[in-house]
Image (cartoon, rainbow, N blue to C red):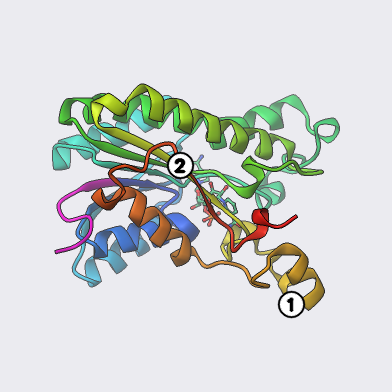
Amino acid sequence: MGRLQDKVAIVTGAGTGIGRACMELFAQEGAKVVGVSRTKANLEKVLAEVEKNGGEGMIVPADVSDPDQVQKVVDETVKAYGRVDVVLNGAGVGYSWDQKSPGSMGSVTETEPDKWREVMAIDLDSIYLMSRAAIPHMQKQGNGSIINISSILGVKGNPDAHAYTAAKGALVNLTRSLCSAYALDGIRANCVCPGFIDTPMIQDHISLFDDEATADRLCPMRRAGTPMEMAYGCLYLASDEASYTNGAIFMLDGGTTARI
Ligand code: NAD
C-alpha cells in the first residue's frame, strides 16, 4: 500500500522540475494525481510517465494566476475524483523568468510596477486562489494537506529578485495563517523552502557549483539538490505520517540557511 493510497492530489507546476517530481512520486505512492501547468505538451509527457509506471491521473493545463482557470482545476478534479486531499502549490517563476519577462527579477529600484505585479500574481496570488477554491472541499471532507513551495529567499533577504523574495516571504506567513485558520477542519498547511535545486528555473546559475569555493559558499553540501529530494519532503507532508505537522517551514536546502 502506497503512502498516499487513494488520495487525490493536485500538483501545480507539474510540467517540470519539483512539481514534476512530486507528480511522479505521489502517483507512485498511490495518489490520483492532477497535474497543472501552462504548457500542455510538458504535462502530457509527465502523465505518460505516470501511467507507464502504473499510476493514475489527469492533466489540466491552466494559468494559476487566473482565478477562473484555478477554479476550473478544482472543479475538474472534484468532477473526476470526487475530492481533493492534497494541494501541492509548486508553480512559480524565478530567475529564469527574467529571460521571458526582462526586468522581473531585479531590486525594487530596477522593477517596474507591471513586472512586480506579474511576479506577485504568479508566485503569491496563485496560492490564495488555489486555497480559496480547494479549502471548501477539504472542509466538507474533514481533511486536507496544503503544501506551498516557498524558497530560502522566503526567509532571507537578497540583493535582487525583490518581487520574488517578497512573494516567497509572504507565502511563508500565509501558510502559517492557513494552518491556524483551518486546523479544526482537519486541514494542515505547510511550507517547503528549497535551496538551490537543479531545475530549469536556475539552469543559468547551476554551473556556479562547478567551482569548489563558490559551491561551498552556496551550500555546506557543495552541491545542488535534486527535484526528487524535494519531492520526498513533500511526500511526507502530503501523507498521514505528517498528521501533527502543521505550519512547519521545512528547509530543504542542504544546510544553506543553517550556516552563518
Ligand atoms: P521550474 O521552472 O522547473 O518549475 C516551475 C513550473 O511552474 C513550470 O513547470 C512552469 O511552467 C510552471 N508555471 C510557472 N508559471 C505558471 C503559471 N502562471 N501557471 C501555471 N504554471 C506555471 O522550477 P522549479 O525549481 O521546479 O520550481 C518549483 C517551485 O520551487 C517554484 O515555486 C520555485 O520558486 C521554487 N523554488 C525553486 C528553487 C530552485 O532552485 N529550483 C529554489 C527555491 C524555490
Foreground pick, 26 / 203: 26
* Image position, residue 184 (x, y; %): 26, 25
Residue on which disc 1 sits: 210
Residue 15 lies in the magenta-colored region = no
Q: Does residue 182 lie above or below 165 as drawn? A: above
- Name the residue rendered at 43%, 36% in the picture: 247
Is residue 171 shown left or right of residue 52?
Answer: right
Q: Amino acid at mark 2?
A: Ala
Q: Amino acid at mark 1?
A: Asp
Q: Who comes first in sequence, dot 2 or dot 1?
A: 1
* Image position, residue 145 (x, y; %): 31, 40
Question: Based on the displayed image, in which of its 4 quarters is residue 135 positioned?
Answer: top left
| Residue 121, visible in the rendered structure | yes
Under circle 2, the secondary element is loop
The residue carrying mark 2 has its beta carbon less than 8 Å from ligand 1: no
| Residue 68, visible in the rendered structure | no
Is residue 83 shown left or right of residue 45?
Answer: left
Q: Does residue 237 lie above or below 203 as drawn? A: above
Rounded to the nearest whole Å, what is the CA distance between mark 2 and mark 1? 32 Å
The magenta segment is 1-9
* Quadrant location of the N terminus in the rendered image: bottom left
Residue 5 lies in the magenta-colored region = yes
* Image position, residue 196 (x, y; %): 63, 60
Question: Based on the displayed image, in which of its 4 quarters is residue 106 positioned?
Answer: top right
Residue 257, numbered label: none
Foreground pick, 223 / 133: 223
- Mark nearer the viewer, 2 or 1: 2
Under circle 1, the secondary element is helix
Residue 248, numbered label: 2
